[in-house]
Image (spheres, coloured by chain):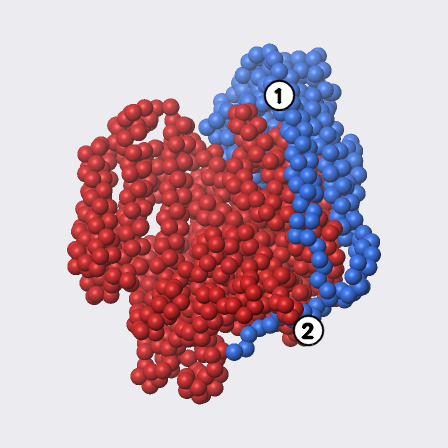
């Protein structure tokens, strides 16, 4: 009966080819420290700075480990072996147990020590990131919506959207929840992220070390326009912040100019009021952002476009071409009506 | 020419009955004049023709089919990725719409995670395991056929969502409530849940088969300590599949029920929780990553020693590392939920678990590099891919440790840093080994080697393209680029990194294109490989390339971990047919295997060996070609597919066909137990089972019960989770569940259990009448319990729509009733044959196995009864 026989011939040729290893230099990470608008490595809040420290510790340790392991691999591949046996077809007589010690030490013991160290750094960072003491009135409730952020300062009586003003150098408490699906709240330059979950309130805090405008993003996929669900965190010194608070606490001004009054009538007579609130008027819809101080905000549609007259007009008339899938429906208006409406909206500072 | 396999024909009585429809391929000579090898070839051949194609079940054929299908999905998923990369190449690109982009990343992730990596590994195992283990077939070849049809059609169903214009768009993780009825109306998510659900059934089916092959069908002498690492890895993978995919199927079912019949599992307004979905999903999702990685390391552990020309350093430690990885991977799921706002204590626990997994990974990496260090490496293409694997995977592993540092994860979670990390782990850690394995084992697929030069080109394009594509993503992540965004603003300074990534992705794709050309080129023009082109140590290299249908005519004997290297006779020849003893002697096992290469030649005989020591236990008939597994697969996909469109009538039709196919599949095809069998048994002191193995059946049934138990645990996990979310239990002033009827049902079921025991006991004693009586009584008792419980549920004061408690109460109850129904069906099937007088004192595997199932169902019932009905009274 024919039985397959193992043949001893081996097709390996005796020459050895050198392998060029293209290791990309991890120094590229340094590029990420450049002053870009949302780099987490800039660490411009104490929390982000703390996490940065953890990252750089892990990066240095990780890089050393990686280089050592790769060095070992290179050595293993290309070390001079001498002509222990001339004939390649002869089987190499290496002991099965040869190298077990290296496997245990290099693969288990030393990694265990390194990992214990990293774990220690992790636990230390985690406890350093505990929420600090925060005065009661600096609590901000942020509610996620498809695809915008409702921002409420319950103690200060302020409601706005897609923009969070905070006093610089002062931690603020952020209470997160969601009106619809799961979102995630992320301001890379200031802190890590935390999810907004319907039916739950998750607690977070933020602090910026220097006055600036920081980009915030939704970091949990939440539907078609997840990409365009951004917000701004505006850190101001105390004086400016208090000014802002005072301004935001005002209801919308009652228009006196007849042109603007006409604009207000158009607003109140349109479908806008089903979803939007303007304090001090009959518009009390809650499905969309509060517009009481719309003109004071720097972006529209959750960070999608800068807030200016042209963009606002475009957004009212054709929101679906600016942010397809947004829940804002288009509004049909004649040219003059639109201008009047824009005149009115521009007074909402 | 008839197409039914099991019809004996009068014309050719000397041909084995299930072969009667075959053309005699060797020659037109009568059966008696064929050589032994020709007879074996015929007995093991797949039937010809179109219908034969549906019946074919040879492990190498099914393995190749599963692998090709998985590769097709790999290409499809890759095309999705390329389109996404074009969109992201520049800021504010309008190449794709937001909706289309979201669909593409959903399809890309789902394809790669569900339809590529796991089936690819399973196909590999089905193809190569019997050869590595030194046996002739997989234990359940028909299950393999079923698995392939289910996988293929489920995957095609999933992709048909493009034709229907309802492409899933909530990501491969489908977080509730975005994926729920309110925020994803329409059928897109039903496609995702149902099409992938059925493909997961395929994965589990193949997993069961792989476990049994490894544990019970190894070559004589291959004790666990001599088992090749690849088999260890596949064993860990297959168990992980059972423990991971089952909860996912249950979770998918719950979500689908939320979407279709208004249950409230994930609805926070009715006591449910969207976070419950995340727990269930990641209990699956995290091991999912490891059950791709573990078999990949198995491949690496086979390739490295052969191309370093020494045995693997630290074999025992690598085995421990594999098993530890399997266990640890189930303790890591919260790893993915660090930003959910869980208590700090649980986060520090899971951070520790996440870092611990670095240790088994470290052991394996050092084992491989040390093997290379102490060996003499040969730089052939499979080895190049292994080097590529080491370079990329170690980097992905290090970033993996970083993301288990909770605060750091808060920053990079769902950013492009994580995208970079897991592509280093999954492309670097999984696809590089897959390609290494394909180049390595190509001779066992086609008989030819793949072209070295094209292979090297493939490697370099793939390796460079991969790093160019994914390394910059670490930086995009740091710069604040979140995952799953269809575009980004110019001011974010992300353009250049994304452009580099896109270029890299196309280079990577070019590498894959080179591989495809290499495959087709080498299939014709490749160098004939011979049996053992790489001078391998394991048994697959002792067979021809490509292997014969029967794999081994004479099964090998193993007394070394490296049989082809160490089992060398005094004359220097490899000898895998003798045990380790002085020349001249023969042992019983040697005589047995010698005899088995000559007999039986009338049916597909394979050997069962001890799970631990690998000693011969039983010779049994592996089931032959049948149309029913294919029918069952088509029917099952029809069931799921018609539910996508809510065509309930078609679902019911599909279920009926499926049930009929199961009956046809298991239709007894008794061979007479002749003097030949009896003689062989006596002479070699081993049971011969021409009608299927009791051992294999029993192990298969045990695994099925395990699977159902895991499903039950998933339901109970959901129950307790919902209970934690609701301070008052049962919520909303619902009364405690009534006890009377369920208690009676419990008593009936316990009684049924006792009668089952009595009945099986009698069959052992040869009291077949009592056995039949017992089976009938069990049916009546079970039917009584079922009736009472249906009555009970009809009387419930609430429907499943009321709140999450009501939903889970109905779900667990429904699951129990379903199991009871299956047990009754099985009982009926066995009873019919029992009354026909099919079973005897010696030949009654079906009776015993169905009894096992009854015990399992009763145990599950008691647990559920205690938790649903009793526990709320005591708290």
The residue under label 2 is: B527
Give the colour chain A carries in the figure: blue
Q: In the image, what residue occupies the spot 19% across and 47% down?
A: B781
In percent of width and height, residue A80 lies at 82, 54
- Of marks 2 and 1, the one in the foreground: 2
In percent of width and height, residue B303 lies at 65, 57
Q: Are marks 2 and 1 on the same chain?
A: no
- Residues B559 and A153: in front is B559
Give the colour chain B carries in the figure: red
* B753 shown above or below A251: below
Say which mark, if any, is on residue B377.
none
Q: Is B766 on the left-hand or right-hand side of B151? A: left
Q: Is residue B27 visible?
A: yes
Q: Is B75 on the left-hand or right-hand side of B808? A: right
Q: In the image, what residue occupies the spot 61% across and 30% down?
A: B406
Quadrant location of the C terminus of chain A in the rendered image: top right
In percent of width and height, residue A58 lies at 71, 32
In percent of width and height, residue A170 lies at 67, 15
Q: In the image, what residue occupies the spot 66% across and 36% down?
A: A109
Q: In the image, what residue occupies the spot 41% across and 84% down?
A: B31
């Amino acid at each position: 009966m024919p039985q397959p026989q193992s043949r001893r011939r081996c097709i390996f040729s005796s020459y050895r080819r050198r392998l060029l290893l293209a290791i990309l230099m991890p120094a590229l990470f340094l590029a990420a420290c450049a002053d870009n608008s949302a780099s987490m490595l800039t660490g411009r809040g104490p929390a982000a700075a703390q996490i940065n420290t953890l990252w750089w510790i892990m990066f240095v340790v990780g890089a050393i480990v990686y280089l050592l392991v790769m060095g070992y691999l290179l050595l293993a591949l290309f070390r001079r072996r001498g002509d222990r046996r001339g004939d390649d077809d002869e089987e190499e007589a290496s002991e099965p147990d040869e190298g077990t010690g290296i496997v245990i030490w290099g693969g288990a013991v030393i990694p265990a020590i390194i990992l214990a160290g990293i774990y220690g750094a992790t636990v230390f960072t985690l406890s350093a990131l505990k929420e600090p003491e925060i005065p009661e009135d600096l609590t901000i409730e942020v509610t996620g919506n498809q695809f915008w952020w409702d921002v409420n300062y319950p103690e200060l009586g302020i409601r706005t959207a897609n923009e969070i003003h905070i006093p610089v150098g002062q931690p603020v408490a952020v209470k997160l929840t969601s009106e619809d699906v799961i979102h995630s709240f992320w301001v890379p330059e200031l802190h890590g992220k935390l999810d907004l979950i319907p039916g739950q309130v998750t607690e977070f805090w933020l602090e910026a070390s220097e006055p600036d405008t920081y980009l915030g993003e939704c970091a949990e996929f939440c539907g078609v326009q997840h990409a365009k669900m951004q917000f701004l965190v505006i850190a101001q010194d105390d004086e400016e912040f208090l000014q802002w608070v005072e301004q935001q606490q005002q209801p919308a001004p009652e228009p006196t100019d007849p042109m603007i009054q006409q604009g207000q009538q158009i607003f109140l007579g349109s479908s806008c009021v089903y979803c939007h609130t303007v304090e001090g008027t009959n518009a009390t819809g809650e499905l969309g952002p509060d517009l009481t101080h719309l003109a004071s905000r720097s972006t529209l549609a959750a960070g999608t476009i800068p807030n200016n007259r042209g963009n606002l007009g475009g957004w009212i008339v054709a929101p679906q071409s600016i942010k397809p899938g947004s829940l804002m429906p288009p509004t049909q208006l004649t040219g003059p009506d639109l201008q009047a409406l824009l005149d009115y909206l521009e007074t909402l500072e | 020419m008839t197409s039914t396999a099991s019809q004996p024909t009068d014309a050719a009585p000397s041909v084995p009955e299930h072969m009667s429809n075959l053309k005699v391929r060797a020659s037109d000579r009568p059966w008696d004049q064929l050589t032994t090898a020709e007879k074996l070839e015929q007995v093991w051949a797949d039937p010809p023709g179109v219908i034969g194609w549906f019946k074919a079940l040879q492990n190498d054929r099914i393995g190749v089919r599963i692998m090709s299908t998985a590769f097709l999905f790999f290409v499809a998923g890759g095309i999705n990725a390329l389109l996404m990369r074009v969109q992201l190449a520049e800021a504010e690109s309008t190449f794709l719409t937001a909706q289309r982009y979201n669909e593409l990343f959903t399809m890309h992730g789902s394809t790669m995670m569900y339809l590529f990596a796991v089936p690819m590994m399973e196909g590999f195992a089905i193809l190569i395991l019997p050869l590595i283990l030194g046996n002739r077939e997989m234990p359940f070849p028909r299950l393999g056929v079923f698995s392939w049809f289910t996988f293929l059609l489920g995957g095609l169903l999933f992709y048909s969502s493009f034709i229907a214009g309802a492409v899933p768009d909530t990501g491969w993780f489908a977080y509730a409530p975005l994926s729920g009825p309110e925020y994803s109306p329409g059928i897109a998510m039903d496609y995702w849940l149902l099409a992938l659900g059925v493909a997961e059934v395929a994965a589990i089916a193949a997993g069961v088969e792989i476990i049994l092959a490894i544990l019970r069908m190894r070559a004589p002498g291959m004790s666990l300590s001599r088992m090749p690492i690849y088999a260890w890895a596949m064993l860990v993978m297959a168990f992980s599949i059972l423990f991971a995919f089952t909860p996912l199927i249950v979770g998918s079912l719950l979500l689908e029920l939320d979407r279709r019949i208004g249950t409230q599992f994930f609805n926070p307004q009715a006591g449910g929780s969207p976070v419950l979905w995340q727990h269930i999903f990641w209990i699956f999702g995290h091991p999912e990553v490891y059950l791709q990685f573990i078999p990949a390391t198995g491949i690496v552990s086979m390739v490295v020693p052969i191309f370093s020309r020494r045995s693997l350093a630290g074999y025992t430690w690598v085995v421990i590392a594999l098993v530890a990885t399997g266990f640890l991977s189930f303790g890591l799921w919260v790893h993915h939920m660090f930003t959910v706002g869980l208590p700090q204590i649980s986060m520090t626990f899971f951070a520790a678990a996440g870092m611990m997994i670095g240790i088994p990974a470290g052991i394996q990496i050092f084992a491989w590099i040390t093997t290379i260090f102490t060996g003499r490496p040969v730089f052939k293409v499979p080895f190049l891919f292994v080097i590529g694997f080491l370079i990329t995977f170690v980097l992905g592993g290090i970033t993996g440790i970083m993301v288990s540092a909770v605060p750091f994860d808060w920053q990079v979670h769902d950013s492009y840093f994580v995208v970079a990390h897991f592509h280093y782990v999954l492309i670097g850690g999984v696809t590089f080994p897959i390609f290494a394995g394909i180049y390595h084992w190509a001779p066992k697929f086609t008989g030819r080697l793949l072209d070295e030069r094209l292979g090297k080109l493939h490697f370099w394009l793939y390796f460079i393209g991969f790093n160019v594509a994914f390394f910059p993503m670490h930086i995009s992540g740091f710069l604040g680029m979140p995952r799953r965004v269809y575009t980004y603003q110019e001011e974010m300074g992300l353009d250049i990194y994304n452009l580099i990534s896109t270029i890299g992705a196309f280079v990577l794709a070019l590498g894959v294109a080179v591989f495809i050309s290499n495959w087709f080129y080498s299939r014709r023009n490749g160098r004939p490989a011979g049996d053992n082109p790489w001078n391998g140590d394991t048994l697959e290299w002792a067979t021809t390339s490509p292997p014969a249908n029967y794999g081994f005519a004479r099964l090998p004997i193993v007394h070394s971990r490296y049989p082809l290297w160490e089992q060398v006779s005094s004359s220097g020849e490899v000898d895998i047919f003798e045990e380790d003893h002085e020349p001249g002697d023969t042992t019983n096992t040697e005589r047995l295997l010698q005899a088995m290469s000559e007999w039986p030649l009338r049916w597909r005989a394979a050997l069962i060996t001890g799970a631990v020591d690998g000693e011969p236990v039983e010779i049994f008939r592996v089931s032959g070609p049948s149309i029913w597994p294919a029918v069952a697969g088509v029917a099952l996909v029809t069931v799921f597919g018609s539910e996508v469109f809510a065509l309930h009538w078609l679902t019911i039709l599909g279920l009926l066909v499926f049930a009929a196919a199961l009956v046809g599949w298991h239709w007894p095809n008794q061979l007479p137990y002749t003097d030949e069998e009896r003689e062989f048994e006596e002479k070699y002191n081993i049971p011969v089972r021409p009608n299927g193995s009791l051992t294999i059946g029993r192990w298969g049934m045990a695994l099925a019960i395990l699977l159902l138990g895991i499903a039950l645990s998933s339901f109970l996990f959901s129950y307790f989770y919902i209970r934690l979310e609701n301070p008052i239990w049962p919520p909303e002033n619902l009364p405690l569940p009534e006890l009377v009827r369920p208690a009676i049902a419990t008593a009936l079921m316990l009684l049924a259990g006792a009668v089952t025991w009595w009945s099986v006991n009698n069959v052992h004693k040869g009291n077949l009448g009592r056995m039949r009586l017992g089976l009938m009584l069990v049916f009546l008792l079970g039917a009584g319990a079922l009736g009472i419980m249906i009555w009970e549920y009809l009387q419930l004061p609430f429907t499943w729509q009321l709140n999450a408690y009501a939903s889970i109460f109905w779900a667990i109850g429904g699951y129990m009733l379903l199991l009871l129904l299956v047990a009754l069906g099985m009982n009926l099937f066995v009873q019919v044959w029992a009354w026909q007088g099919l079973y005897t004192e010696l030949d009654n595997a079906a009776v015993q196995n169905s009894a096992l199932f009854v015990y399992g169902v009763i145990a599950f019932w008691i647990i559920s009864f205690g938790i649903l009905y009793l526990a709320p009274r005591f708290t």
